[in-house]
Amino acid sequence: MSLFPIEETPITYADVMVPLAVPNLFTYKVPEDFVPFLEIGFRVIVPFGSKITTGIVAKIHDQAPAYKTKYIDNILDGRPVVSPQQIKLMHWMADYYMCTIGEVLIATLPAGMKISSDSKIQLHPDYDPEWSGVELNEKERLLVEHLLEQPHVDFKELPEIIGIKSPSKVIKSLVEKQAIILFEQVKDKYSPKKEKYVRLKEHWAEETALQQLFGLLEKKEKQQEVIMRYLQAVNIFDQPELNEIGLSKKSLTAQEVSPSAIKTLVKNQILEEFNVEISRIGHTSKTIPDQVELTPAQQKAKAEINQGFENNQPVLLHGITGSGKTELYISMIQEALDSGVQVLLALPEIALTTQIVDRLSKYFGDQMGVYHSKYSDNERVEVWKGVVNGTIQFVVGVRSSLLLPFDHLGLIIVDECHETSFKQYDPAPRYYGADLALVLGHLHQARLVMGSATPSFEQFYLAEKGKYKLVQLTERFGQAQLPEIQLVDISRERKAKTMQGPYSSVLVKALEEALKKGEQAIIFQNRRGYAPVLICEDCGTVHQCPNCAVSLTKHQFQNELKCHYCGYKAAVPHECFACGSKDLVDQGFGTQKLEESLQQIFPEISIQRMDLDTTRNKYSYQTIIDDFEKQKIQVLIGTQMVTKGLDFEGVSLVGIVDADRMLGFPDFRSNERAYQMMTQVGGRAGRRAERKGKVIIQSRDLAQATLHTVVEQNYTGLYKNEIAEREEFHYPPFRRLIKIVVKHREERVCQQAAVYLNAVLQEWLGTHRALGAQSPAVSKIRNEYIREIIVKLERENIDLKKAKRLMQQAIIETEKQAAFKKVRIYCDVDPY
DNA sequence: AGCACGCCGACT
DNA sequence: GTCGGCGTGCTC
């Protein structure tokens, strides 16, 4: 025994993020073997409760926590797959958007990188049913007998085998009796796509050996042929190292080489087969290596943008529709990539079409990765890994691409930055991509450009205040001009009886003229289905969804009433369910009815609808766009989908059927939204030099000021009015909004909980900050009642973190009340 | 979020 | 008396 105390090596701990909705990091001991190479950002397998899970190492330290710790089970990667900046970003998100770090990790990590734990059971190797000396009950015996037949079973199969729902008791008892053991099998869900390759066995891969080989194969023509072909493709005389890379079996067999000859060569140890991981993303190589040509206006804008960058300012690029922002982006992306930094181009979901991807891949080829929600999880894992190992330097993607493992981003572009789809509604983290881009930019010291023809007024305000550098592009690309916008008074046409269904005579005439000239048109109506309301003429009953507080939409083709919130479907009734009357009429116009009416007016033309119903599957959206581009379709009728960044040469006319629906929204942003939507969809008209486009806006009330700002394209005019109102009534950007959502199956409980919570908030934050329990426009969805509380916080001179903490405490306080135990409450920071 | 533990009613 | 219901609280 030593007299001196043994010097203890300090234990290393790792704080691990787990992809579960838990608020904290969890501290684990790092096994000594792992200590030398474990780094922040590694994926690890950790025991968690009774299960195991994948986690991300967020911190490594030697501070023993107060509780007892378990060991990290295993390490999954040889290098970090999460960057330090990402870890900071995730913390910021959890903090700012008031959710758990686990929820952020769930949103961040593709499912394929989380590992599934499947517990398996087998008999204890020393267990002998004859001699064990312990009594088993019937269920236990059943399982043991099963295991004697089958060496191991899956945990999930147990209920079936022993005939009870929760088998854990049986398992626990058997483990205690040392009859069985549990083991866990970890499998990586991600399976890279592989391709079979062949190469010469090392022994043969040099000149003299090859000469011998041909001697050996003298009479075996087929085999000789294979070797010849191989050597043609892989010139190992000049570059011996090429044999290492080999040649894909596919490309050999493609040259009319017999597969059986290859097989024989492999069998005789002349060739060897091996697998190569190949990328799932289509290989597109650069076809336009040259620089893009910029117009003088674009060059000027670019110089201004660079000026902003010099001052470390993010840039708001306000460029009218069709001003050629994409060329500008391409030129900036090229420069950034040349300087060796990573680049991210974030686009709203629907703007990320093959149209833009094809165009970009012509410039950037293989170094570009596409991150899109319609891609499979495997494809997402591939982009993730590509960013980690540097094969992908440039990502074009949707909102979630901001969460990729970048570690040296130099340029971030958020295009169509006004788009509401940059905001995630559900589930948490309810983040806003455009703001997150700003934070991401800070973390990487990267340059940021936000581009839009119609920036949100909050974004424009920040530019005015100098937080962004404002750069304007006021000319359309080429010789194209902005379209002429015309208002049509449909209440007057109604009185004059010149309307044809939803179409005014002015719009019909314009369509006629456009079609005569062989030009295309887009009709915009932000409402899908046939008619949004089915009403009884006798008693006035509106057919409502049984699960949601909305009227059912009639869908003509399936002859169904559908709920657009929960998916409820019912056959269109023949009589009113309340009074039995047969006088049921539909009201309002959805895209289906617009299509039907238009076809009646122009029976010969080809019309296509583009809405959620016609673009359900992966390719239908693309097919419609292709058909429209190739002029197989003359008129495209659609919802919001047609407003986003599409570029069709042949379109000269855009009709907006019902502007009032957009303007009448009870929301402080409704004018801004209506302006954006009308300008964006109008911008699809006349994008080529030859023809000046035309936009026709139908409304019942032409006195609405917003309409005229659209006609005059007076963005700043509307902005000034609106911003003054926002200031007066304390709305963003002058205040910060946090929406608290309260949900429960019973309306009374929901209401009471919201009222209670509001009272607590008013007490803790002040009556002027919590604005009361409100019933939202749709107050019930899927049989859950909803109440909302808007919390308004000052922008300055307020401890935001403290306010949020108080809000979270108020929520906990409410949830604690016995009557509100099952009420679900969450926060939506900066709601849209 | 999942999952175990625990305290109560229904049935062998 | 056991089985299984669901409510409560923890997971390093």
Image (spheres, coloured by chain):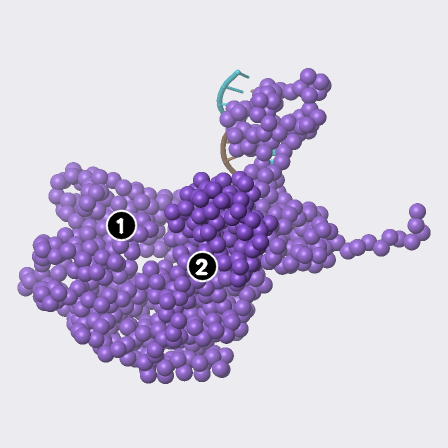
Chain colours: A purple, B cyan, C brown
For the C terminus of chain A, which image quadrant?
A: bottom left
Q: Amino acid at mark 1?
A: Asp
The answer to which image quadrant residue A133 occupies is top right
Residue A360 point in image, percent of width and height: 37, 66
The residue depicted at 50 percent of the width and 74 percent of the height is: A339
**Residue identifier under label 1:** A613
Question: Mark 1 and mark 2, same subunit?
Answer: yes
Visible residue check, residue A779: yes
Mark 1 and mark 2 in contact? Answer it, CB < 8 Å: no
Residue A110 relative to residue A123: left or right: left
Please say if A541 is above or below A98: above
The answer to which image quadrant residue A597 occupies is bottom left
Residue A34 relative to residue A296: left or right: right
The residue depicted at 58 percent of the width and 63 percent of the height is: A84
Tell me the subunit letter for badge 1: A
Residue A186 point in image, percent of width and height: 58, 42
Q: Amino acid at mark 2?
A: Ser
Visible residue check, residue A790: no
Residue A299 point in image, percent of width and height: 36, 82
Tell me the subunit letter for badge 2: A
Residue A247 point in image, percent of width and height: 48, 52
Label 1 SS = loop
Question: Badge 2: few (under 14), some or many (20 or more) residues near its Cα, within 10 Å?
Answer: some
The residue depicted at 48 percent of the width and 65 percent of the height is: A393
**Residue identifier under label 2:** A400
Label 2 SS = helix
